[in-house]
Amino acid sequence: MSEIRTRIAPSPTGFAHVGTLRSALYNFLFAKKNNGKFILRIEDTDQSRLVPGAMEDVVKVLEEFGLTNDEGPRWIDNKIEEVGQFGPYQQSKRLDIYKKYAEELISGKHAYYCFCTPERLEELRKSQEAQKKAPKYDKHCLNLTQEEISNRLDSGERHVIRLNVPVAQTIKFNDLVHGEVSISTNDIDDQVLLKSDGFPTYHLAVVIDDHLMNITHVLRGDEWMPSTPKHILLYKAFGWELPIYGHLPLLLSRTRKKLSKREGDVAVREFLAQGYLSEALLNFIAFLGWNPKTEREIFSLDELVQEFKIENVNKAGAVFDLDKLDWINGQYIRQLSAEELHKRIEPYLMDANLNYENYAKEFIQKVLTLEQGRLKKLSEIGERVRYFFEDPNYEAEMLIWKKSNKEDSQKNLQALYTKIQEIPNDKLQKDFLETEIKNYLTENNIETGNALWPLRVALSGLSASPSPFEIMDAFGVLSNGKDIILRRINSAIEKL
């Protein structure tokens, strides 16, 4: 076989979402696994729906996720530039090409001019619906004489070009995911190929572009399956070799319905803004329809390239489970070095208005490392570490352990205040503190929970937080760390 060439061809009618990223990933993996090329093409023929910045967004997203395309628009020197020998890679710049091939289809009787007005088409649709028929063009303009067509074209009458779908034929193709697929042409509409404004529809443009760009494999979402027979008719009409098709499973919510924005069908940038790491999101998306047939769940992009097999892509829809994404993201967060964690989480510290700039880098990294194992998303960091940067605010009742009472809690905190006061500043370290304080509690017959619970709440103001020894260890790197610890314990005693 010649060089394998895959592509994605998103429409810049919105910012790159998870479906786009999943299609890009599978096409990238398939191409790279087979030493092939991955191409980006922009399908911008629906001019009325274009969103400013959407093309730039998809180009940047691909590069940020490591899915850099071999051909097509690339982000080079802070601007979009095309690379590759089959350009332009924007359909809006290829209109003359589509017009030429559309006229070739008409010459071969594979397409025809249609002059029907929107009003007639609407009446036809209503009539078919009343008869419980699927809406479909009735080939009315196929019966026009050549003289009628010429006269109407010469007068400048608005028209489109439609695909002339043959009657009662069966179209079969072998799908990489679904196996053999068979569809009757009686179920296929005479699709518009070239619109009245001279722009092609998706169906004409995608076939011409895939052929001219030597695309060998078309991997796209299941929603495009009904369009594939139309595309096969066009390939046959032109006498071109068909690419190999593979239709990827739909993305579903946990209730197995089509994914909604609330459940995950959102722009990739929104996930990144929420504190998901790009490598974790990519790992999660890889499993939305593909399975390595092992127990392993964490893969780098290079490892995905090595493991990816198109035969392991599922037919059934893939459930978008945010809990699973949170788990995978947590695994990736745990693997970050202290330096890298600090770098990636800094924007979220800024958003939380913690005044963290006034603290030493050593302290900040210690605080972040302390919470690293508990984070599911980087955006959670603000509320988790706020107590390190400002005194906590809580109700006195929180200080009382479930087996204790107000008086004992106050007495135990006072005893701990005295004990901690005796500990040298350079000994405010987790292991030393834990040994010293637990020995002290044992020697004085103080029940551990009755003392350590109010100590932890006094230091953090939270019912769920790291241990008091870990909190004091972090404060210990500050020159006034011990003063902060003692002040908070004293504040708790006063509350009680």
Image (spheres, grey):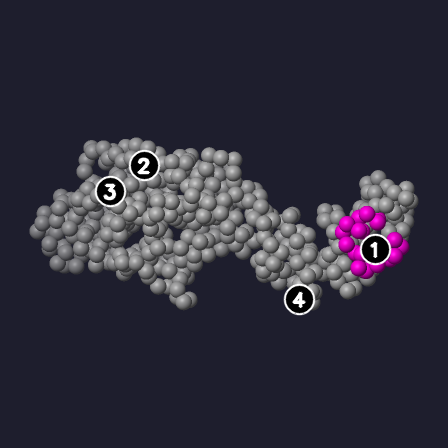
Task: Check residue 242 in the rendering and tell me which mark sits there, or answer none.
Answer: 3
Secondary structure that dominates the magenta span? helix
**Image position, residue 381 (x, y; %):** 64, 54
Badge 2: residue crowd in 10 Å (few <14, some 14–19, many ≥20): some
Query: Which residue is labeled 4 in the image?
Result: 357
Q: How far is disc 2 from disc 3 in space, using C-alphas? A: 12 Å
Mark 4 residue type: Glu
Residue 15 magenta-highlighted: no
Q: Farthest residue in the left direction?
A: 147
**Dot placed on the residue nearer the N-terminal end, 2 or 4:** 2
Asked if marks 3 and 1 touch (Cβ < 8 Å), the reply is no
Q: Is residue 105 left or right of residue 261?
A: left
Q: How far is disc 4 from disc 1 in space, using C-alphas? A: 25 Å
| Residue occupying the point 42% across, 43% down | 306
User: Can you say whether 311 is above or below 118 in the image?
Assistant: above
Q: Is residue 469 left or right of residue 265?
A: right
Range of residues picked out in magenta: 418-437
